[in-house]
Image (tube, grey):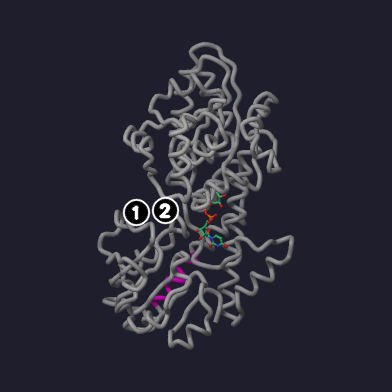
């Protein structure tokens, strides 16, 4: 089978490369010429473990191709995935201009039956909007189906998530489209992946509901972490015991600096907006967004408090800038809020991240970027763990203690044992533990 993926951003490239790995012939299309040229050379525009290898191997094997020519890609493909961005507008709703542009382009180049699939996270109802756009722009009457097939890829584990997903969701109107989609995902049938076959609107909503629920779980435990600090309880043990209840589960109950990234913040806001447009009040999702904002604010305030309100001229070391480990993505990262606040209060910032420094540099040039955690710690008045990269989990703490100017340690991902750090002589702050 031949398929086309329009948009070689994060979702599009992972999807294209992984389908090629399944043995499907994939053409990835993007209007950005230099990006396409680089991809042909095996240069991936972002950091994602395992992806480069798959891209290079399948490009060499002739199953994965890159082009700027949408016409050719549409002509030779039975299934066309739309995987372009849906950036948030000022009011939190998703901007569909790229999706609409692509739908128009596809329509203009359609000469026979196609299945048009949305992979991008799009507001409920977008599938039907795409159907309208395509019908309006067809040059001659051609049959086609629209499908919603949302992605659930986590940055940093996207290849694994694609190859071994918890489920595949397919929303379609007609059996023919469902059969083609099932055929495309056949390798996952073999490993008994659950398939949820439903209508287009339900599939579109599943993605938003999933991400909003995950965000709610994180915000819930973050609120409980605040209460733990107030009463002297331990949030890690609370979360562990809660998670052992099979109805709750242990995942997404790690208290920390709140959720960031390109999906959870954007999708929660978009869902609230979608609901408002229909006159529905999603109070819980709104509260999750608000709790997330408060968590970042509260933990940043704790740093200021430790300096009696004034960090002017103090050197603060930041360990981790990416919104989570194994990615170079800094979108909505808690690091941005913390660094911004501390810089406003005239602190001197030193920072290290194994992957995200280049991205951070484009926003903040006034920071001292370091080569490792020890360079950050040298002469620092405080150290803040913002992202739980593995290499921060086993630091030589005695060495850190010796090279720091002061002894303030903010472990905002709860990596270390409070007693051990206190015994080493640090003034240790974590999240929801005393
Ligand atoms: C998410 C969804 O998991 C994925 O299915 C979807 O397709 C895209 O959005 P991603 O944004 O890559 O993936 O990151 P994820 O691993 O879900 O983490 C999201 C945020 O929540 C991160 O900022 C992370 O640090 C935070 N988080 C996660 C917590 O604070 N505590 C937790 O227990 C789990």
| Label at residue 359 | 1
Where does the image place residue 404, in percent across and percent down from the top left? 33, 81
Query: Most extreme residue toward the right, as rendered?
Result: 246
- Residue beneath label 2, please? 329
Q: Residues within 10 Å of mark 2 (few under 14, many from 20)?
A: many
Determine which of the numbered discs, if any, sits on residue 44 in the image: none
Name above or below for residue 282 compared with residue 388.
above
Ligand 1 within 8 Å of the CB at mark 2: yes
Q: Give the residues in magenta.
A: 294-304
User: In which quadrant will I find the N terminus?
Assistant: top right
Helix, strand or loop under label 1 = helix
Q: Position of residue 302 (x, y in %)?
A: 44, 76
Query: Image height check: is 229 above or below 92?
Result: below
Badge 2 vs badge 1, beta-carbon distance below 8 Å:
yes
Please give the name of the residue rendered at 32% of the width and 77% of the height, measured from the top-left corner.
380
Report the residue at 69% width, 35% height from top.
198
Examine the structure image and report whether residue 190 is included in the region drawn in magenta.
no
Q: In this view, does 162 lie to the left or right of 85?
A: right
């Amino acid at each position: 089978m031949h398929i086309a993926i329009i948009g070689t951003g994060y979702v599009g490239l992972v999807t294209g490369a992984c389908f090629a790995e399944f043995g499907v012939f994939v053409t990835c299309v993007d209007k950005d010429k230099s990006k396409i040229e680089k991809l042909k050379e095996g240069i991936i525009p972002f950091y994602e473990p395992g992806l480069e290898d798959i891209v290079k191997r399948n490009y060499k094997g002739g199953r994965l191709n890159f082009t700027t020519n949408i016409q050719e890609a549409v002509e030779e493909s039975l299934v066309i995935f739309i995987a372009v961005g849906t950036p948030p507008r000022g009011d939190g709703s998703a901007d569909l201009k790229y999706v609409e542009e692509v739908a128009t382009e596809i329509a203009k180049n359609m000469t026979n039956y196609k299945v048009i699939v949305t992979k991008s996270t799009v507001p409920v109802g977008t599938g039907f909007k795409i159907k309208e756009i395509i019908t309006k722009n067809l040059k001659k009457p051609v049959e086609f189906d629209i499908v919603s097939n949302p992605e659930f890829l986590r940055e940093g584990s996207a290849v694994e998530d694609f190859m071994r997903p918890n489920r595949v969701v397919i929303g379609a109107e007609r059996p023919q489209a469902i059969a083609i989609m099932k055929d495309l995902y056949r390798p996952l049938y073999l490993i008994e992946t659950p398939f949820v076959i439903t209508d287009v609107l339900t599939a579109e909503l599943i993605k938003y509901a999933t991400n909003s629920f995950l965000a709610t779980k994180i915000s819930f435990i973050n609120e409980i972490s605040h209460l733990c600090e107030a009463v002297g309880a331990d949030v890690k043990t609370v979360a562990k015991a809660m998670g052992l209840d099979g109805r709750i589960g242990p995942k997404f109950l790690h208290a920390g600096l709140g959720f960031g990234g390109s999906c959870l913040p954007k999708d929660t806001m978009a869902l609230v907006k979608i609901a408002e447009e229909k006159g529905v009040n999603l109070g819980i999702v709104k509260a999750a967004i608000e709790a997330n904002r408060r968590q970042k604010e509260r933990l940043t305030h704790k740093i200021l408090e430790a300096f009696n309100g004034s960090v002017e001229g103090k050197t603060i070391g930041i360990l981790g800038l990416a919104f989570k480990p194994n990615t170079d993505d800094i979108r909505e990262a808690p690091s941005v809020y913390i660094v911004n606040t501390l810089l406003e209060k005239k602190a001197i910032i030193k920072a290290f991240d194994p992957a995200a420094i280049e991205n951070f540099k484009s926003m903040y040039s006034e920071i001292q970027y370091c080569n490792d955690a020890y360079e950050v710690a040298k002469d620092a008045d405080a150290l803040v763990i913002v992202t739980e990269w593995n290499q921060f989990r086993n630091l030589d703490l005695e060495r850190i203690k010796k090279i720091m100017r002061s002894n303030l340690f903010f472990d905002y991902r709860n990596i270390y044992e409070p007693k051990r750090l206190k015994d080493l002589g640090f003034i240790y702050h974590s999240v929801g533990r005393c």
